[in-house]
Image: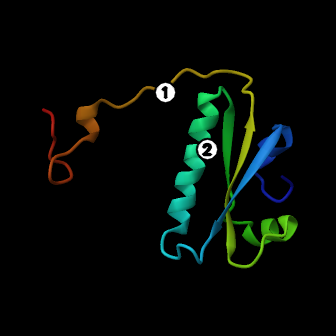
Amino acid sequence: SRIHMWASPIRKAPIAIVVVCDKNASPTSYHVDCANATMYVMLAAHALGLGTVWIQTLRNVDEIKEILKIPEGKIPIAILALGWPDEKPEPKPRKRLEEIVYMNTYGNRLLK
């Protein structure tokens, strides 16, 4: 948590998961593949009543690799802090469907 200014949740969380990708296994889409995997972990944690914080690793890849002894060709994509949340925030208001759904071309409202 000391190498990233936004990583303080790691200090407080009982567990942290570092999501590491093999960029050689999927050279064109490893970022997306691992981001999807990270989201599935977050959804599973939420289903169990756990809270998560996604800490981006883009600026500190080399330092993280050194600290965790991650081998060449493997890239840390995210660090997830997991724990029991102190509070349960109310859901944020969502935009209405007709504000965000278009038909065939952007801006052509599906629902009027």
The answer to whether residue 74 is left or right of residue 3 is left
Count of all numbered marks drawn on residues in the image: 2
The label on residue 92 is 1
Q: Quadrant of residue 87?
A: top right
The residue shown at (61%, 31%) is 46
- Which residue does the numbered mark 2 point to in the structure image? 41
The amino acid type of the residue labelled 1 equals Lys
Q: Secondary structure at mark 2?
A: helix
Whether residue 6 is visible to the viewer of this picture, yes or no, is no
The amino acid type of the residue labelled 2 equals Val
Q: Position of residue 106 (x, y in %)?
A: 21, 52
Q: Position of residue 89 (x, y in %)?
A: 60, 22
State the quadrant of the C terminus.
top left
Of circles 2 and 1, the one toward us is 2
The label on residue 40 is none
Front-most of 39 and 94? 39
